[in-house]
Image: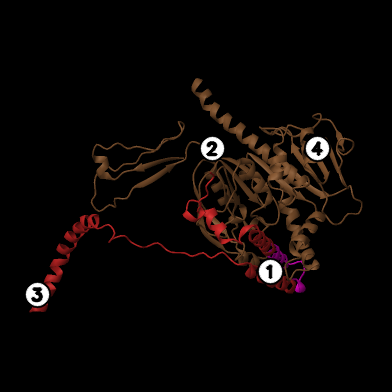
């Protein structure tokens, strides 16, 4: 961003030169000056920031059950470097995360009805009537064109809409929530979209793990909560998966018969074919059908082992490629072995996926397909971002030539 | 007499009094900028909510949801009540994670925000 200092009228009327901090060659600079002096004006330095040199890349992530410091976001921001944190000095209940390269916005901030409003009308947060899609579209569009916005804050604890916070346009904007792909205008603004599809059994198991420690909750209340939200979820949230460029589907494992613990998971990464700047990951041979169990002579795995599948498929009338992992990683060498056999990972060096997984070994899902595919999608997004930026840099040069 | 004169004065002088005073203000402000700074900033102390509060809210919301649904299990109110339970449970679990992740050491917290202060400087050699 270019920062220019505007000096007072006295300086301008004299022979002082207006200097600005060095900025990149492609930035535009705007100069303001007052032609006549007026004694009653304050003599404070004004700083005008111009952010006209970048086009923000917008990523959409649809996931159920609220936003916040979700694991996917942390992995994603970690791929780009740096940790994402809430804005300093602002509302401590803010849902926004900011790092050097990325900003993550929670779409719950665009609720038009707060908790009491929803209770009166008898609407859930999943219902589009509880969300202001016009404001969402305007603000995402503004951020994408490099204009800062005052975004409202939805406080999850009090259930009220707090005072807005200023969001500067980042290089990569991630919008995370229940409805990133619901509104068509917002969908068109997204450069890449991801949908996390958790199956009912796994969702139930995860919610039990999360809520049983909470007093007041019982098995029945958790079950009632899931079932009450299911109709709205199926009607409004689930259809978004047909628009996603990548779907991470989490299912119960097939390796353990009658498993109901939900610890071992079968994760499928469904990647749409033909998306610009996105080349799907594959195993051994693109477009073929492979079933692979890496455990054997070269690699020893503990029960239940690991099983991979790769196949082209059709998903909601789109051509897709599906990479599937069932099982768990127990050791580092299993991870690096698997990584060396996957192709088109968009890594910058050998072992980058393993390194990223190990960096966050304490995150949930670090030993199974959820962590693996989230990391891979993060690398794919980095690749997409770099290609987009490179393309935008060459486009003006070509236009100048023509 | 004096009152008449006073009122007469009052009528006449305001116009004369205001302008010179205004012109006077500007250079006076320049000479003593600290005197005329307006402290209009609203100090909003936004306190981060504690974990116990959220747990109480979760418990209360579950009670409410059970009551609302006892009357009519398929109404919008029932569904909205369980949605609220879900939202509060998510908030509670996030608060727990945040607390586990690093709220325990106040010095660490302070230093992560202000690494350049004397207490937090680290030397590599």
Disc 4 to disc 3, C-alpha distance: 97 Å
Same-chain check, marks 3 and 2: no
Q: CA distance from mark 4 to mark 1?
A: 42 Å
Determine crowd level at label 1: few under 14, some 14-19, many 20+ residues with C-alpha closer than 10 A: many
Q: CA distance from mark 3 to mark 1?
A: 74 Å
**Chain name for mark 1:** B
From the image, tell me which residue sits under label 3.
B5
On the rendered structure, is A122 left or right of A84?
right
Q: Give the number of the mark in front: 4 or 2.
A: 2
* Mark 4 or 2, nearer chain start: 2
Q: Which residue is mark 4?
A: A314
Residue occupied by mark 1: B58
Give yes or no for residue A278 being in the magenta stretch.
no
Chain A colour is: brown
Q: What is the secondary structure assignment of the residue under circle 1?
A: helix
The answer to whether B47 appears left or right of A61 in the picture is: left
Mark 3 belongs to chain:
B
Mark 3 element type:
helix
Find disc 2 in the rendering and name its residue. Answer: A55
């Amino acid at each position: 961003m270019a920062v220019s200092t505007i000096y007072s009228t006295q300086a301008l009327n004299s022979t002082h030169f207006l200097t600005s901090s060095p900025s990149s060659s492609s930035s535009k600079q705007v100069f303001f000056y007052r032609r006549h002096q007026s004694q009653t004006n304050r003599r404070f330095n004004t700083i005008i920031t111009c952010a006209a040199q970048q086009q923000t890349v917008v990523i959409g992530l649809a996931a159920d059950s609220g936003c916040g410091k979700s694991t996917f976001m942390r992995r994603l921001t970690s791929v780009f470097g740096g940790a994402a944190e809430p804005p300093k000095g602002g509302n401590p209940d803010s849902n926004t995360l900011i790092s050097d390269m990325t900003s993550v916005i929670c779409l719950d901030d665009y609720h038009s009805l707060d908790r009491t409003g929803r209770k009166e009308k008898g609407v859930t947060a999943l219902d589009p009537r509880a969300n202001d899609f016009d404001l969402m579209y305007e603000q995402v569009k503004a951020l994408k064109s490099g204009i800062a916005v005052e975004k409202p804050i939805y406080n999850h604890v009090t259930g009220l809409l707090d005072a807005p916070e200023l969001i500067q346009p980042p290089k990569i904007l991630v919008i995370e929530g229940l409805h990133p792909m619901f509104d068509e205008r917002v969908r068109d603004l997204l450069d890449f979209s991801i949908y996390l599809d958790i199956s009912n059994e796994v969702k139930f198991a995860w919610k039990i793990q999360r809520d049983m420690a909470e007093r007041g909750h019982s098995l029945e209340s958790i079950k009632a909560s899931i079932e009450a939200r299911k109709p709205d979820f199926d009607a409004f949230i689930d259809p978004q998966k047909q628009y996603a460029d990548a779907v991470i589907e989490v299912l119960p494992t097939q390796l353990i018969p009658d498993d109901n613990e939900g610890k071992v998971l079968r994760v499928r990464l469904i990647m749409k074919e033909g998306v610009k700047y996105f080349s799907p990951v594959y195993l051994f041979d693109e477009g073929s059908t492979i079933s692979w169990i890496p455990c054997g002579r070269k690699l020893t795995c503990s029960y239940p082992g690991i099983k991979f599948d790769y196949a082209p498929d059709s998903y909601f009338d789109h051509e897709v490629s599906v990479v599937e992992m069932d099982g768990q990683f127990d050791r580092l060498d299993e991870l690096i072995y698997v990584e060396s056999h996957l192709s088109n990972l968009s890594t910058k060096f050998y072992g980058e996926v393993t390194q990223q997984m190990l960096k966050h070994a304490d995150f949930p899902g670090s030993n199974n397909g959820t962590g693996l595919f989230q990391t891979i999608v993060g690398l794919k997004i980095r690749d997409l971002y770099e290609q987009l930026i490179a393309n935008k840099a060459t486009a003006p040069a070509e236009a100048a030539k023509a | 007499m004096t009152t008449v004169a006073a009122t007469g004065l009052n009528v006449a002088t305001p116009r004369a009094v205001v302008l010179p005073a205004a012109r006077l203000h500007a250079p006076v402000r320049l000479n003593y900028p600290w005197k005329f700074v307006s402290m209009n900033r609203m100090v909003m102390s936004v306190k981060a909510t504690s974990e116990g509060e959220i747990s109480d809210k979760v418990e209360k919301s579950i009670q409410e949801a059970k009551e609302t649904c006892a009357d009519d299990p398929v109404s919008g109110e029932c569904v909205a009540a369980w949605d609220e339970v879900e939202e509060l449970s998510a908030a509670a679990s996030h608060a727990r994670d945040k607390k586990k992740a690093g709220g325990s050491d106040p010095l660490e917290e302070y230093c992560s925000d202000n690494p350049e202060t004397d207490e937090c400087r680290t030397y590599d050699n």
